[in-house]
Amino acid sequence: MEKGTTETLELDTFSLFFPLPFRLAIILVAGFWGWGVNLHYLTWARIDVPALIRYPSRQYPQQPPHYLSAYHLAMLLTIPLGVFLLLFWAITYGSPERVIAWEIIPQTYLMLFVALLIFPFHRLSRFGRKRFLATLRRISVGGLAEAQDGKFGDILLADALTSYSKVLADIYINYCMFFSSDMSSTGKPDRSCGRPLIVPTLIAIPYAIRFRQCLIEFFRVRRHRVGDDWGGQHLANAAKYASAFPVIIFAALQQDHDPVTSSMSLATISRLWTLCSFINSAYSFWWDVTMDWDLTLLTRNHHRGAFRQQQDYPYGLRRHRVFPRDDLYYGAIVIDLILRFTWLTRLSPNLDRINSFESGIFLLVFLEVARRWMWIFFRVETEWVRTSRGPAPDDVLLGELGKYDDD
């Protein structure tokens, strides 16, 4: 049987023009553009991001700003993507048979993408690419630099990987189908391709990385304990990432449920998945707002503190802010809440259709990446406020848990 023959009838219109490997490429390239925009706006807001992540500053005025270098690299990755995409459309012109047959075009771009990042045959953003790969290599096993060596940068990248967890799993699916004798990577994605445990394991790896980093921070604090700080905030942060593991496990059990061999019914597994998803999303949302952004909206003594200090800062925010408009903070809270709970679409008979189409799956993955992009603005701004207003906390990830009661 010819490779991918059975898949041609299963391709929807979206997949005909944006098959899985191209969708992966678009999200990966979007990440580089997003980082450039992060740097650009934060530079405009007079936040020194390179200083926070311990990245060397520009030595000469003639050197382009860091955000411009990020844009140049993003453009380098985007131009060939556009060329390969146009070539693919020109050759396949919406024919399912041709889309299946010409999987080599998007696969060639993915190889080129890796080559442009890794191999030093061009000078564009050479040091930035080297730093990115070194950081990625360090955090890939859950490592964490010391504060003076760029710990905050490690944390930002590791957190970004959690939002790319499903992208990492789809990269595996892409190559599993590409090297399969009876499937095509441009066909309908078979997310059960290969061994059943590989995909949930890949999704869990970014959370395991951050979990280990939090434990490293906890033991560092224990070794160098100062005052009453025993590192409990790092265990609380580790628990947040650990709460993602039951969600991944029950999602995998739902997908591979066999009523004959399973000790639990599908309904029970679904209820447990819903409960664990709610706990993980609610905890993560609270952490985003209260711990990562230092906003007071969800703190225990917020109402009493807001009444006492109503002249100092707007409702639910904090005294020191860098961004010029308060509605940016309120908008970020609302958007983060909505996007943290996109899994609720699975509980609605009408909205669940989003998860049945490749366009809907792509949209949800892209929205999570966009949520992380937004999160970075406020996480970096918060870190800048912490380090520039009064004595900076020893830990650049989190401040003291109790400081919110006194703010």
Image (tube, grey):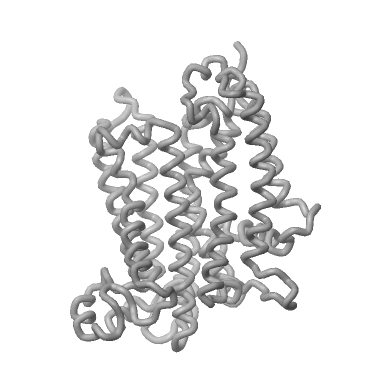
* Residue 190 seen by the camera: no
Quadrant in which the N terminus is drawn? top right
Outermost residue on the right side: it is 121
Quadrant in the picture for residue 73: bottom right
Q: In this view, does 324 lie above or below 261?
A: below
User: Percent from the top left, x then y, of residue 299?
Assistant: 26, 72
Quadrant in which the C terminus is drawn? bottom left
Residue plotted at (59% across, 22% down):
100
Q: Is residue 388 above or below residue 381?
A: below
User: Percent from the top left, x then y, of residue 134?
Assistant: 66, 60
User: Percent from the top left, x then y, of residue 319?
Assistant: 34, 82
- In the image, 356 versus 204, the foreground residue is 356
Answer with left or right where residue 367 lies relative to residue 283: right
Residue plotted at (46% across, 73% down):
381
Outermost residue on the bottom side: it is 390
Residue plotted at (37% across, 59% down):
240
What is the tally of numbered marks visible in this picture? 0
User: Percent from the top left, x then y, of residue 288?
Assistant: 37, 64
Answer with left or right where residue 88 lies relative to residue 206: right
- In the image, 37 versus 206, the foreground residue is 37
Quadrant in the picture for residue 318: bottom left
Q: In this view, does 356 lie above or below 208?
A: above
Residue plotted at (56% across, 66% down):
39
* Residue 335 seen by the camera: yes
